[in-house]
Image (cartoon, rainbow, N blue to C red):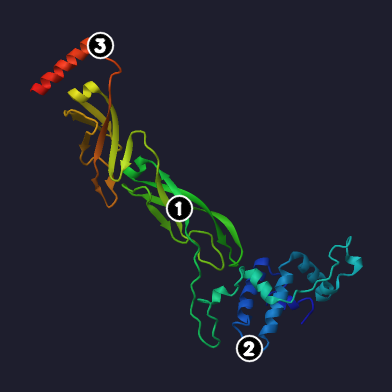
């Protein structure tokens, strides 16, 4: 085995291999020859050599020395005449712990987690089943919608940024993705929209679910109460006592003209059936519109006005 090609031959790649190809080769062979999976003679030595080869070829500085001066130049130090102000003149010594290299590559304190279930070790000679990776916890984000959106339904597009694995199966990069949300008429505050496995990708885990939680923006006219809409109206004492008509604009663009013929007192509400929010289970069904009243009393009255009110109210009670 050539001293300038030993590491390349160990990883079964050529000298022109890219960084991604080096990682891919190490990943495949390190798993194949790991002592927990391979008890054949020589596998431990091969596993150790793979660790040393990856430690050198994955480091651009070490790789450059190795490619030019071979293993001897890497470990003994390059000849002084080739150095530049002492650069690259230090000797390389592998730390001798292939498990450390394996752990740094795969990440975490349990680098063999992909091949264990419930911490049970592999049984040599026994066929291994496909194991489930651990899934990250859900990523929750709030989705703010107007009352009009929740009344009529709409489509919202949300851009997220997430980490995506590269083709080598180990390294990753950040990419944007558009999530499309079809808002159904009648959705309520707290509705959860789940996008399975749209979180960050990683070689040793299942991506998290992305969960959008509906939050309703305040509305200038209505307050939502379950499937009902509350419309608050200020009225004069005269209207409260004598009756009037109120025009209420709806969320779908109509104008309701509603007569109020009853005497309005502080606890009085006017209920208009079927003019509330659509039901999410059946948008053809609706809650109610409930009009509440705030009676505004005059700050002061003349003696004549008081007399007239007393007369009117007295005659009303006599009737």
Quick check: 59 above or below 244? below
Q: Residue at x 25, y 34 (%)?
A: 291
Gap between marks 3 and 2, in whole Å?
A: 109 Å
Of badges 3 and 2, the one in the foreground is 3
Asked whether 243 or 114 is in front, the reply is: 243
Gap between marks 1 and 3, in whole Å?
A: 66 Å
- Dot 2 falls on a residue whose secondary structure is loop
- Dot 3 falls on a residue whose secondary structure is loop
The residue that label 1 is drawn on is: 179
**Circles 1 and 3: CB atoms closer than 8 Å:** no
**Circles 3 and 2: CB atoms closer than 8 Å:** no
The answer to which of marks 2 and 1 sits earlier in the sequence is 2
Question: Residue 273, how many percent across, how many down?
Answer: 20, 40
Quarter of the view holding residue 228:
top left
Asked whether 160 or 261 is in front, the reply is: 261
Q: Residue at x 29, y 50 (%)?
A: 280
Question: Residue 47, how many percent across, how many down?
Answer: 67, 80
The residue that label 2 is drawn on is: 40
Asked whether 190 or 12 is in front, the reply is: 190
The residue that label 3 is drawn on is: 302
Quick check: 120 above or below 77? below
Gap between marks 2 and 1, in whole Å?
A: 49 Å
Of badges 2 and 1, the one in the foreground is 2
Category of crowding for the residue at label 3, using alpha-carbon neighbours closer than 10 angstroms: few (below 14), some (14–19), many (at least 20)? few
- Dot 1 falls on a residue whose secondary structure is strand
The answer to which of marks 1 and 3 sits earlier in the sequence is 1
Question: Residue 229, how many percent across, how many down?
Answer: 29, 39
Q: Residue at x 24, y 31 (%)?
A: 266
Q: How many marks?
A: 3
């Amino acid at each position: 085995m050539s001293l300038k090609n030993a590491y390349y031959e160990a990883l079964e790649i050529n000298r022109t291999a890219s960084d991604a190809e080096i990682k891919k080769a190490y990943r495949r062979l390190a798993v194949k020859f790991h002592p927990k999976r391979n008890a054949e003679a020589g596998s431990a030595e091969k596993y150790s050599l793979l660790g040393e080869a990856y430690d050198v070829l994955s480091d651009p500085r070490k790789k450059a020395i190795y490619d030019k001066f071979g293993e001897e130049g890497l470990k003994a130090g390059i000849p002084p005449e080739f150095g530049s102000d002492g650069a690259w003149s230090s000797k390389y010594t592998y730390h001798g712990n292939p498990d450390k290299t394996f752990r740094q590559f795969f990440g975490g304190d349990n680098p063999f987690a992909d091949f264990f279930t419930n911490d049970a070790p592999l049984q040599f000679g026994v066929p291994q089943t496909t194991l489930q990776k651990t899934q990250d916890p859900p990523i929750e984000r709030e989705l703010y919608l107007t009352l009009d959106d929740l009344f009529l339904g709409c489509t919202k597009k949300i851009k997220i940024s997430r980490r995506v694995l590269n083709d080598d199966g180990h390294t990753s990069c950040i990419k944007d993705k558009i999530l499309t949300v079809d808002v159904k008429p009648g959705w309520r505050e707290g509705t959860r929209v789940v996008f399975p496995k749209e979180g960050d990708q990683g070689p040793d885990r299942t991506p998290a679910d992305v969960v959008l939680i509906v939050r309703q923006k305040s509305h200038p006219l209505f307050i939502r109460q379950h499937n009902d809409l509350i419309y608050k109206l200020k009225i004069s004492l005269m209207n409260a006592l004598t009756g009037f008509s109120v025009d209420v604009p709806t969320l779908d663009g109509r104008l309701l003209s509603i007569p109020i013929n009853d005497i309005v007192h502080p606890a009085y509400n006017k209920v208009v059936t079927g003019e509330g929010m659509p039901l999410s289970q059946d948008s053809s069904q609706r809650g109610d519109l409930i009009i509440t009243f705030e009676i505004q009393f005059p700050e002061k009255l003349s003696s004549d006005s008081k007399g007239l009110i007393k007369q009117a109210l007295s005659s009303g009670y006599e009737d």
